[in-house]
Amino acid sequence: MLLEIDNLVKQYRKGPRANDGISLAIAEGEVFGLLGPNGAGKTTLVNQIIGLKVPTSGSIKIDGVDVVANPDYARKACSFQAQTQVPIAGLTAIQAIELVGQIRGGEKTSVQGKAAKLIESLEIREWANKMGATLSGGVRRIVAFCMAAVVPGRIVILDEPTNDIDPVRRRLLWNEVDALAKTGSAVLLITHNVLEAERAVNRLAIIDQGRIIGSGTAAELKGHDEEGMRLELVLEPGVEMPNRPSYLNHTVTSNRRMISKVRERDVAQALNWAQSLKEQGVVEEFVLGPTTLEDAYVRLVGRLDVLENKEASS
Amino acid sequence: MPKVIRQYGLMLKWQALSQKPLLPLSMAVQVMIAVGFVIGISFFYPDINPTIAKFLTTGAPTIILLMIGLVLLPQIVGMSRKEGTFDYMWSLPIPRIVYIAADATIWVAVAIPGVIVALALGAVYFDFDLSISPLVIPALLLVATSGVLLGYTIAHGAPKPEMAHLATQILVFAIMIFSPVMYPVEQLPDWLAKIHSVLPIQYMADLSRGTLTDLDVDLGLAFIVVGTWCAVGFIATSILIRRRH
């Protein structure tokens, strides 16, 4: 395995453990998703991989090299797109991408060629010569992605890469992520956008309160969620949550939302029930559909509010 | 080309471009401070003569260089710390000290026009002659570099960026009023003079005076003391920026 993390613990002086015994392994050519709500410990984990923070205990190895002891090795092996915006206020998009490529050891002309290609395929030509300070948040994030991809590390770490990005360019960006993996880089993708992750990753781990609470392929994680359907209700404001029929399982609620599982044979009655609630003015809208990774995610984390995070960012 | 030189060149370009929006303004402010400083002195001393004016004007480079290194720089580094700039810059495969060296180069360059303007204007305005020794270049570079490195020490050593900001406020005051730059050390109370005998500030002033005028100054001692502080700043900065929390 290219990246091996074993029983990693990070304890800050104050507060609970930010990482509490995390173990995972990522192979070359793999896109690995790390999903979790805000404050789950995702960014703390990344900061330890690239040597910005030092673990309290446990080990991180890249190519078998202990990078806790050799952070310089980690920085050579990893290229990184931070969750915070990159400091490129005074540089144009193209200057930033090309300079980082050269700083990462790329040769000037090949870096220029690669930068031009990324700018074309992510459709940011019109901003290429604009100063970072004048770019919108979304374009700046695409530029940050290009900075991580222009001379990619053997591990490419992307922390919330699609925040603020429009849907068309999101799709283009996922294509580029795919291309990175095809050239042999391992991609570690940190996100709380479950639906996007489901499409983009080969394997994923779900992290909450510093622990990995589930991992595997999307299909493995969905497991028993895959059978049956999901019913999602949004209540009218100020209305109390109605009593649920007994055939609704694994229900999670928050504020005005409720998500339940429905077995195939109960679908018809569930639909009628939801329809009648709508007619009574209790329910604003409802959706009945196949289960998604989101359902597994909500079930594992045990709180529906983790999805509100996703909505805020998408 | 050795790898580290290439890295330094790239980092210098990165920093120069990054600071570009701020650089002309910083330089202009430094020149204005220099001009204001020289003219302002004459208001303190209504019957100023060329000898006193020479002493005061040759204190100006030290004040300007320290203001940049110990005041402006920690504030800007503090701002960058808050914005998370270093989380990104320090994830790049480049020694952090190379980044610091490039950044320091820019700040020293920002300081130079102000220093030259202050000296030239002072000499013309108060009508005295400078006797410039070739040692002035290493002397002022040493003062500037020490100031900048001690500035990084404050900026990266402060547990919180806000604390570095506060420290700079105190330093402005301490340098301008309670340091023997604009007046001879003999005018300080003994206890304060003793403290200053181990601090770099009066020796920085000596370095500029000893290389710009015919005033009698122990240049050797000044080089040794400021050089030692420069080394302390370098070591402290190197340790602080390699720290991982």
Image (cartoon, rainbow, N blue to C red):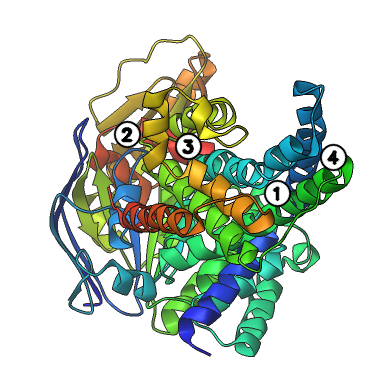
**Between residues A169 and B216, which one lies in front from this camera angle?**
B216
* Alpha carbon distance from label 2 to label 3: 11 Å
Mark 2 or 4: the one toward you? 4
Q: Residue B48 — which label?
A: none
**Residue visible at 23% across and 39% down in the picture:** A209
According to the picture, the residue beneath numbered tag 3 turns out to be A287
Kindly indicate whether the residues beneath marks 2 and 1 are on one polypeptide chain: yes
Mark 1 or 3: the one toward you? 1
Callout 1 crowding tier (Cα within 10 Å): few <14, some 14–19, many ≥20:
few
Q: Secondary structure at mark 3?
A: strand
Q: Residue A136 — which label?
A: 1
According to the picture, the residue beneath numbered tag 4 turns out to be B126
Amino acid of disc 2: Ser
Q: Kindly check if marks 2 and 1 are in contact, taking CB atoms under 8 A apart as contact.
A: no
Q: Is residue A87 visible?
A: no
* Alpha carbon distance from label 1 to label 4: 53 Å
Chain designation of label 4: B
Q: Kindly check if marks 2 and 4 are in contact, taking CB atoms under 8 A apart as contact.
A: no
Mark 1 or 4: the one toward you? 4
Amino acid of disc 4: Phe
B99 versus A153 height, above or below: above
